Amino acid sequence: MSERFAEVDKLRAEMLQALDEVAGDVLRRIEGVVLDAVASLSRDAAPALALQNRSRWDNVSFDSSVGLHVTGDVMVTSVRSDCVSSVNRFGEIFCIIVQMNSLKIIQCDLLDIFCILDIYYNDPQLFGSQKTVDSIVDDISCMLKVPRRSLHVLATSKGLISGDLCYLEEDGTRVDCSSSSLAVPVSSNVGNITNIVSSAKFVLIVEKDATFQRLLDDDFCTKLSPCIMITGKGVPDVSSRQMVRKLWDTLHIPVFALVDADPHVHLVVCVFSSQSMSFEAHSLTVPSVLWLGLLPSDIERLRVPQDALIPFTLRDERKLRSLRSRPYTACQPAWDREMDIMQTGKKKAEIQSLTFIAPEFLTRVYLPNKLRYGGWI
């Protein structure tokens, strides 16, 4: 029997060796950071960390085939241990790097995935929140120039998915997303799901959970066309973005976004070409995501009642100006025209505003016509 599977055993050994090489490379990079700090201390100098500045648009450029990605000449931020404004951040980053090494997270078997909570609860007083830990893990991933999944630290997914989709989790669990009444939580380990099977014609990203549930209750995924719906319940988390990218890469189908006509939630579309995670563009971004609705021009065309519209605030105006100055706007003239309509009217609208036209207008008229006649940009 063992001879029959000799080639399979050989293949498995080669895969494990490759994983060991990746883990060894990550560890060497971590050790390099630690040794640099020790060398600074030996010279009576204050240790410092050089982090790519993920909040600056100067550091990224837009490519239609990739989305936003890090440019060659990246501006860095120095996180110093002797500076009042950055000493806490320095301590937090070093604490997590030490935990990654001492808990043997990097050397662990691929099945042993650590959660943000595991790190947070080792010192909750230092970090203050899980969100802080999540941001620092992103910084470490960027600093070491390795994919976040190579650090074996995952955040709990908040996203939900439903529709014509089946796949296998890494532990062999078969996940069926085709239930017409219940959604499935997005996997926290998207990188290792396999055997994706679907006859879906498109993926629909739904910004709001309430809208997602409404579409689920109306059996939208099967009534109009076999499709897959996913929601990140607002701005999507990393796992939700990874899932959309995985589906896009595997199924080669269009990806649409259904969001409010609002400069803030317009970021839900833009985040799939995110600035802050542009160093991992190839695994997180979907540069060809299409804005299905709610478009500002839809508000005018459908004559949505004025009572359903929300006046702009100063914060809205600042956000819109910021969006229009970003690199991908120049590559999306149709998006820019929609933002011009929004800026001129100084009004925004939620998806739910369509119920002012008719209670079931969204599912029975708006989306079917949009998808049938190509009403996206």
Image (cartoon, rainbow, N blue to C red):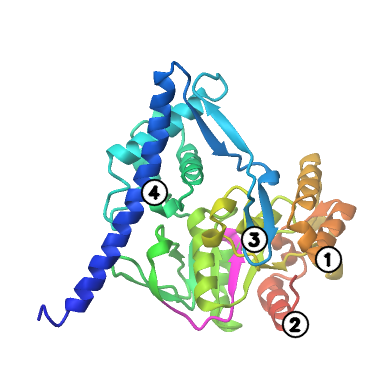
**Residue in view at x 43 percent, y 62 percent:** 190
Residues shaded magenta? 196-210
Q: Which mark is residue 297?
A: 1
Residue at image mark 4: 151
Alpha-carbon distance for marks 3 and 1? 25 Å
Question: Where, by quadrant of the figure, is residue 307 drawn?
Answer: bottom right
Q: Are circles 2 and 3 on residues that touch, CB within 8 Å?
A: no
Q: Is 192 within the magenta? A: no
Depth check, front residue: 215 or 129: 129
**Label 3 close to label 4 by CB (< 8 Å):** no
Specify the amino acid type for callout 3: Gly
Between label 4 and label 2, give the one nearer the viewer. 4
State which quadrant residue 201 falls in. Answer: bottom right
Q: Earlier in the sequence, mark 4 or mark 2?
A: 4
Q: Which mark is residue 373?
A: 2
Magenta run includes residue 205:
yes
Q: Callout 4 environment at 10 Å: few (<14), some (14 to 19), or many (20+)?
A: many
SS of the residue under disc 4? helix
Residue 67: mark: 3
Task: Decide which of tag 4 and tag 1 comes sooner along the chain.
Answer: 4
Q: Amino acid at mark 1?
A: Ser
Which residue shows up at 17% across the image and 77% down it? Answer: 6
| Mark nearer the N terminus (3 vs 4) | 3
> Residue 116: image x %, image y %?
40, 44
Compare marks 3 and 1 and give the one earlier in the sequence.
Answer: 3
**Image quadrant assignment for residue 291:** bottom right
Q: CA distance from mark 4 to mark 2?
A: 45 Å
Closer to the eye: label 3 or 1: 3
Say what secondary structure mark 2 lies in.
Answer: helix
